Amino acid sequence: MELVEAIILSVLAASTPLLIAATGELVTERSGVLNLGVEGMMIMGAACGFAGAWLTGSILIGALCGIAAGTLMSLVFALMALGLAVNQVATGLALTILGIGLSGLIGAGFVGERITPAAHLYIPGLTDIPLIGHVPFGEDAFVYLSLALIVGVWWFLYRTRPGLILRACGDNHVSAHALGYPVLRIRTLAAMFGGACAGLAGAYLPLAYTPFFIPGMTAGRGWIALALVVFSSWRPGRLVVGAYLFGAVTILQLHAQGWGVGIPSQFMSALPYLATVIVLVLLSRARTGGSTAPAALGTVFVPDR
Amino acid sequence: MRKTLLALAAGLLLAGSVGAASAADKLKVGFIYLGPIGDLGWTYQHELARQALVKELGDKIETTYLENVPEGPDAERAIEQLARAGNKLIFTTSFGYMDPTLKVAKRYPNVHFEHATGYKRDKNMSTYSAKWYQGRYIQGLIAAKMSKSGVLGYIGSFPIPEVVSGINATMLAAQTINPNIKVKIIWANTWFDPGKEADAAKALIDQGADIIMQHTDSPAAMQIASERGKLAFGQDSEMIKFGPKTQLTSILDTWGPYYIARVKAELDGTWKSEDSWGGLDSHMFAMAPYTNMPDDVKKMAEDAQAAITAGKLHPFKCPVVGQDGKAVECKGGDHLDDGQILGMNFYVKGIDDKLPGK
């Protein structure tokens, strides 16, 4: 049973960066903006987050640096893709390339350094409960934050007027514009939120997951977050399912290898992708038919004045 | 995914990252690196060797390196770029550069090429690699002595002969100390993904392993072992900083002496195409100091290292028994020959796991 608890803890740690980054991208895409630069914003968040934490000794400041780096990157994206109406796909890809290069440069001086990772919550009595204590009461702050974030985003999108306006921009920017909403400003804010989340998700890696910085340490997690948004059909609830499912299968396949179940490891490595895609596709077919992609996703909007 | 990204990134960076080369009469030596020089692992060790080379022969040579060059068509362009820039000796430092190097070598017969860890050669293209399995054997001895649970945790990258021979050497050594030793193997199916390597290390420890061995590149596993109070071995480079009370030793790639020797040969005009597969005796790699172990274990490790270096001890001494219980054909006299080790695709007896793809 201790093993079960250990596995759940590993799953939560592996899923958290995906969930945070995907939450941000979900909001961005719901406003009609397709930012493929998540990986680049994440790795910048990782480099700057580690730098901040190493220089100040504070995980909180590190996390804030990560958020700032991601937000700055998304502003570069917004300037190009929204301000100058450049193709969003190309801009996003360029952002990733820029992020990978720039983070290597920023992080170069910090390679080989280590920090004390983010502390885990400890409530005397509660955390100590065998088997069920650590999972709800013994996580690091990022895990709780990621859950608060996705609940907040769900509430914002479906229960508030600004959320409705944001979705309107994503579904039909011409109508939203005609109604007098500042489409580009709303989209810029949404993109900035996406950047902030990606930066935080990236910072999670060197601040809590593996407390050191190495160039390229995000290793494709930004792309997985992007895919999760699509397969969740842009719904926060399914996003949580997708992120945790992906993390769970990733960890379980490692354990299965250790137990020696005899399935080729190459297949096991592919399993998280397969399982997540299949489950999310089934989910979206069962409840609603067809795609729920924001109708104006990725399209350029130039307001007529 | 990461590879594709790097391909994109490298394509962009290629033009920018070529170091300047100007002086006329100096011998120009070029290097192609797979990762960033700050990867703390494979590429970093090649870069250290280049720096040693510059320190030794800096007045006679001029070096250029290209980093983050992905394996594949981009590599060919990068290698050709170095050849065209007037480099007379070019080191291509990853297995996947094999065919690109060969192609460029055919187009530039007057340039000499050195390819790491490959098996294709030409009259102007040498290969070089190291017998890391020797180091793995020493690690196996230490692991068996230091393990309390009798379960070793092994993180593999890909099930290729180099990695498989490392696992076998580890187990053959460990069995001489503890015939019932177990190994749990987890394939990460990547050389580099710190998060995944950390997850694999956690899984192994959660399943009872108390010694973590890795054949992946980042120090993540070392750090997890350190957090959990277990012991571990580093990989490629010195990782003791990530586990001061954890690292037992690490196999260090030390290409410096080889690079210096080959450049000297080039300067003297005696360079010729060769296949160098060096072990401890030729200083192709070294063992990091033996730490966090009692003196008798340390002495045993040092003795084994001395015996292997002197050629008195061979990790794959016959009979080598496979999982099917049959002894493997002994082609090298009293030990397996190089070809058998370079193409190793079976597990030895005592590993309760199936080799992927078998």
Image (cartoon, coloured by chain):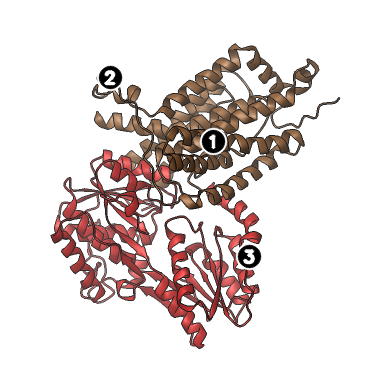
Q: Furthest residue to the front?
A: A56
Mark 3: few/some/many CA within 10 Å (<14, 14-19, 20+): some
Instruction: Give the vertical position of A141 relative to B191 (above or below).
Output: above
- Proximity of marks 1 and 3: CB atoms separated by less than 8 Å: no
Q: Nearer the viewer, mark 1 or mark 3?
A: 1
What residue sits right under mark 3 in the picture?
B77
Q: Amino acid at mark 2?
A: Leu
- Colour in which the image shows chain A: brown
Whether callout 2 and callout 3 share a subunit is answered no
- Colour in which the image shows chain B: red
What separation in Å lies between label 2 and label 3 (alpha carbons)?
Answer: 60 Å
Q: Amino acid at mark 3?
A: Arg
Q: Nearer the viewer, residue B103 or B287?
A: B287
What residue sits right under mark 1 in the picture?
A199
What is the chain identity of the residue bearing mark 1? A
What residue sits right under mark 2 in the picture?
A126
Q: Which secondary structure lies at badge 1?
A: helix
